[in-house]
Image: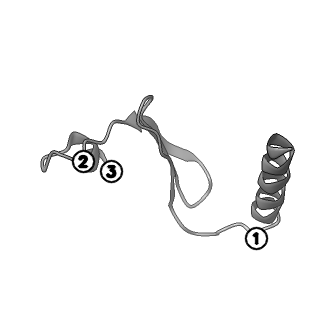
Amino acid sequence: AAQKEAVKTFTTNLEKYLLTEPIKNRRIAGLDPGFKAGCKVGIIDTTGAKLEACNIYPNFHNKNDHAASQL
């Protein structure tokens, strides 16, 4: 029952995003958070062309975090 409810919630949320009007004339950065496999980062330009895609590995205990400088 929990799995069915989770799929239903995901479907409802996804439908909202798919029906949203596209953002025009803006650069967009998308983040998929993760600690084990790193955070996935994707950046597109104003035309929708991919500018960058990479994984970063944030370290919240380090002031000079390399992941922060990558962003």
Question: Is 65 above or below relative to 54?
Answer: below
In 3D space, how far apart are the residues under numbered discs 3 and 2 (Cα atoms)?
A: 14 Å
Q: The residue under label 2 is which amino acid type? A: Phe
Task: Point out residue 21 in the picture as x, y percentages from the top left corner.
Answer: 76, 70
Whichever of callouts 3 and 1 sits on the residue coming sooner in the sequence is 1
In 3D space, how far apart are the residues under numbered discs 3 and 1 (Cα atoms)?
A: 26 Å
Residue tagged 1? 21
Q: Quadrant of residue 20?
A: bottom right
Asked whether 61 or 4 is in front, the reply is 4
Task: Point out residue 26 in the picture as x, y percentages from the top left corner.
Answer: 54, 67
- Element type at mark 2: loop
Q: Report if the CB atoms under discs 3 and 1 are less than 8 Å apart.
A: no
Eye-nearest disc, 3 or 2: 2
Q: Which mark is residue 50?
A: none
Task: Point out residue 31 in the picture as x, y percentages from the top left corner.
Answer: 49, 50
Q: Is residue 42 left or right of residue 1?
A: left
The residue sitting at 46% across, 39% down in the picture is: 34
Q: Is residue 11 left or right of residue 53?
A: right
| Mark 3 neighbour density, 10 Å: few (under 14) some (14–19) many (20 or more) | few
Residue tagged 2? 60
| Mark 1 neighbour density, 10 Å: few (under 14) some (14–19) many (20 or more) | few
Asked whether 53 or 31 is in front, the reply is 31
Query: On the rendered image, what quadrant is the N terminus found in?
Result: top right
The residue sitting at 58% across, 69% down in the picture is: 25
Eye-nearest disc, 2 or 1: 2
Residue tagged 3? 71
- Element type at mark 1: loop
The residue sitting at 81% across, 41% down in the picture is: 3
